Image (cartoon, rainbow, N blue to C red):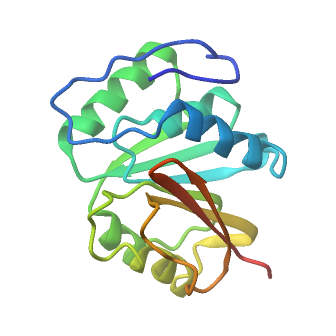
Amino acid sequence: MRIIGGRLKGIQFFAPTNLPVRPTTDMAKEALFNILYNNYDFEECEVLDLFTGTGSVSFEFASRGAKKITSVDKHSGCIYWIKSVIAKHNLDEIEPTKADVLKFLEQETKQYQIIFADPPYDLPSIQLIPELVFKNNLLAPNGILVVEHATYTKLNQQKGYTQTRKYGNSSFSFFENQE
């Protein structure tokens, strides 16, 4: 995994092979950040990275100057890895949080400008992610939720849905809070 933009551009990370992850591909990540970077001033954004895994997306946001990133994953190994990268590269804007994502979404009260979720593709309750985000008012006005999922999964009937972009076997579905 590599950082594709910002102050850490070009740095490669080699996460432990025993982590239960499927990192976002560099091509998909680059496309995602091109979309987000044209619409948001990252320095003003608080970001929520759900199912953070290796932290690749969180590190990318930090590299590009995001104000604060909360990275949530239930796997201890993922959280330990992220903390080691934070310490090595002084990424104090990242706050790793060990938690079950769906329980976290049920209890969280803070609003975020950008929420990114990259759940396991076989997660049966993937549609609960946008549902909980909107039910608990976690998306700031004019904020965006991006859910990465298998291309065969359809989320276009969920509240706030605006579009889906396909990148091979992966897709990003976008949801907006248009208050």
Instruction: Find residue 153 and report its horizontal and vertical position in percent.
Output: 42, 70
User: Which quadrant does the N terminus fall into?
Assistant: top left
Instruction: Find residue 55 and report its horizontal and vertical position in percent.
Output: 42, 36
Residue 61 in sight from this viewpoint: no
The residue at the point 47 percent across, 52 percent down is: 170
Image height check: is 49 above or below 22?
below
**Residue in front for this viewpoint, 120 or 8:** 120
Instruction: Find residue 73 and report its horizontal and vertical position in percent.
Output: 31, 51
The residue at the point 28 percent across, 41 percent down is: 21
Whether residue 112 sits left or right of residue 147 in the image: it is right
Image height check: is 34 above or below 101?
above
The residue at the point 49 percent across, 49 percent down is: 70
Image height check: is 42 above or below 15?
below
Q: Which residue lies furthest to the left in this view?
A: 18
User: Which quadrant does the C terminus fall into?
Assistant: bottom right
Residue 26 in sight from this viewpoint: yes
Instruction: Find residue 123 and report its horizontal and vertical position in percent.
Output: 27, 67
Whether residue 172 sits left or right of residue 13 in the image: it is right
**Residue in front for this viewpoint, 177 or 152:** 152
| Number of marks present in the image shown | 0
